[in-house]
Amino acid sequence: MMVKKNGLLAAGAIAVAASLALAGCAAGSNSSGTTSDADSSTLTVWVDADRAAVLKDAAAAFTKESGVKVKLVQKDFAKIQEEFIAQVPTGKGPDITIAAHDWLGNFVSNGVVQPVELGDTAADYQQVAVTAMSYEGKTYGVPYSIENIALLRNTALAPTAPATFDDMTAAGVAAGTEFPYLVQIGPEADPYHLYPFQTSFGAPVFGTNADGSYNPDDLTVGNAGGEAFATWLASEGAAGRMSVNLTGDIAKEKFFAGASPFLLTGPWNVPDAQAAGIDLSIDAVPSAGGQAAQPFVGVQGFMVSAKTKNAIAANEFLVNYIGSEDVQTALYDVGGRPPALTAAFESASSDPITAGFGAVGASAVPMPNIPQMGKVWQFWGVTEAAIISNQGDPVQLWQKMTADIAAAIQ
């Protein structure tokens, strides 16, 4: 792999910088709780198995240029957040970890990450990716991928993209299939997949500050738009178009079998759909409430430990190696998630599937990365399930949910 480096620090400069960083950390190691057994000439990086092979080549190139070794430690992605928060304060955590952007608020509140200096390279990334990796005005990670749901359309059953939700439903009915459209719900509903419909009614979960960050003191989900969404959700349930019996597995199997022209899902179901012989188009989620239907964007990237003794080398490795077009493209090749770096994304967009998801993602919104979001999910899904199942007045159920969330995040 050829890594294009932007302003790579000379090997000697990194060594000196690492030494200075070490000296600075060593002076405060006793009071900060940082362990003294970490090797200042080595960067330890936590990474999942799928990304490890790509980083191996980038790590070798970085070591050759800088003299700083990179030790890759494979971790179960699902367990990284918890382990990172537990180990960093003890000094046993890594210098760098792979992470999802919505862990960021939890990381910052626990004091386990430090900001990353993207410098001029910040403009090289898609804006939504940098926003997702930012918290309280500071950028804490180098993004490498963007992921979001969109509308998969079976072009044999629906030749044109629907402009609105009503258009989609009408096209589905005209196709004569079992379902006019498919979206996974499940026993506790699925707020993630239903969110673009909710935003189309003007009911985001939280309001935002002037810089685009989420404001935990502005719980907007219970506004008039939220009530309208709840009423609409009940009507879709009553019409039988949405059901808690429609799980993710059932929804995709029905779509693969040609039981509907439309499936609201992510790129993870594209390979199986293509294997089923479906000619796909990737479209924007049609609006049900009149405003833009914005799905959540999930951004993955790499963050630096607050306790690293190699902060400068860690920043250099992330910005100029993980952030290079070659590495971002290689990460896309193994994972299929659209790259966060614009140049790599434009190259990957020769694939119309990637281009389609990327176009939807560009106008989507980051999943809230504030800690308060963790209190939302427990009430959100069960309420949507109750509304879809017509277990009460939808507006009353929605407002009770809003009050429960507000109490939980106090």
Image: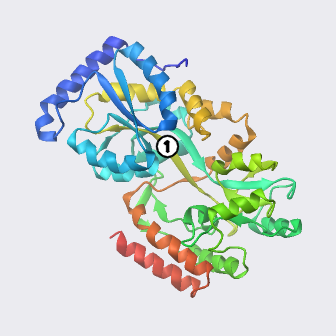
Q: Quadrant of the N terminus?
A: top right
> In terms of image quadrants, where is residue 305?
top left
Residue 401's place in the image compared with 93, above or below, is: below
Residue 186 lies left or right of residue 134; in this view the side is: right
Give percent across and percent down for residue 270: 70, 48
Q: Which residue is mark 1?
A: 300
Residue 374 lies left or right of residue 241; in this view the side is: left
Q: Quadrant of the C terminus?
A: bottom left
Q: Please state which amino acid type lies under the numbered disc 1.
A: Gln
Q: Residue most toward the bottom?
A: 392
**Depth order, front residue of 199/242:** 242
Residue at the image position 44 percent from the left and 28 percent from the top: 319
> Can residue 25 be seen at all in this image of the molecule?
yes
Give percent across and percent down for residue 222: 50, 75
Residue 271 lies left or right of residue 124; in this view the side is: right
Give percent across and percent down for residue 340: 56, 38
Number of numbered discs on residues: 1
**Depth order, front residue of 360/243:** 243
